[in-house]
Amino acid sequence: MAAIVAGDVKEIAVDHPGLGGYVFEHKSTEDFNFRKGGFQNRDDDGDNTSSGTKIFVKERKSWMLETTVGATEGAHDFLQQLHESSVEAIVTLVFQNGKTRSATGLPVGDIDQNAFAGTIPFKFSGSGTFDEV
């Protein structure tokens, strides 16, 4: 069985056809969560028949990446420009072990910069799936 490699993200790059690219610096020791996207079975205790047979309700979920990045020069402005765009960007995540995932999407949710901590919440979602490349 292969070892589980965990830890900090090596790189988060966003490339937009009209706005250009930006490499965000992941904040060390912060959680990062991602969802590949596609179909998932709904988790609802009520999805059963009267005889107890489980009903698997398939729901399509968007891919998602959520973490915290450093408030480097231009990071907040670039995220705001992406929020204002209707064209999805290519988002690429590189793990410490070299594995890479990529998808197209845009930032979702608040991008309130924490000036004291020097961080920005980073959450993207979009079309398709967040696949290994």
Image (tube, rainbow, N blue to C red):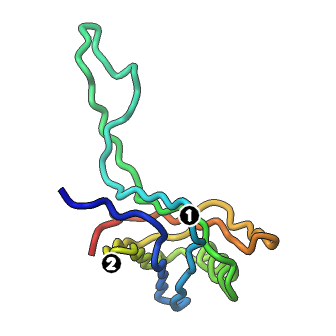
Q: Quadrant of residue 96?
A: bottom left
Q: Position of residue 3 (x, y in %)?
A: 27, 61
Q: Position of residue 55 (x, y in %)?
A: 27, 25
Q: Amino acid at mark 2?
A: Gly
**Which residue occupies 64% across, 65% down?**
121
The quarter in which the N terminus is drawn is bottom left
Per the rendering, the mark at residue 98 is 2
**Which of these two is toward me, 36 or 88?**
36
**Which of these two is toward me, 32 or 50?**
32
**Which residue occupies 39% across, 50% down?**
61
Mark 2 vs 1, N-terminal side:
1
**Which residue occupies 48% across, 63% down?**
65
Residue 69 falls left or right of residue 116: left
Helix, strand or loop at label 1? It is: strand
Q: Is residue 38 above or below residue 127?
A: above
The quarter in which the C terminus is drawn is bottom left
Extreme residue in the right direction: 116
Q: Nearer the observer, disc 2 or disc 1?
A: 2
Residue 29 falls left or right of residue 75: left
**Which residue occupies 34% across, 22% down?**
47
**Which of these two is toward me, 126 or 5?**
5
Helix, strand or loop at label 2? It is: loop
Residue count near mark 1 (Cα–Cα under 10 Å), binned few <14, some 14–19, many ≥20? some
Label 1, on which residue? Answer: 67
Gap between marks 2 and 1 measured at Cα? 18 Å
Q: Is residue 10 above or below residue 46?
A: below
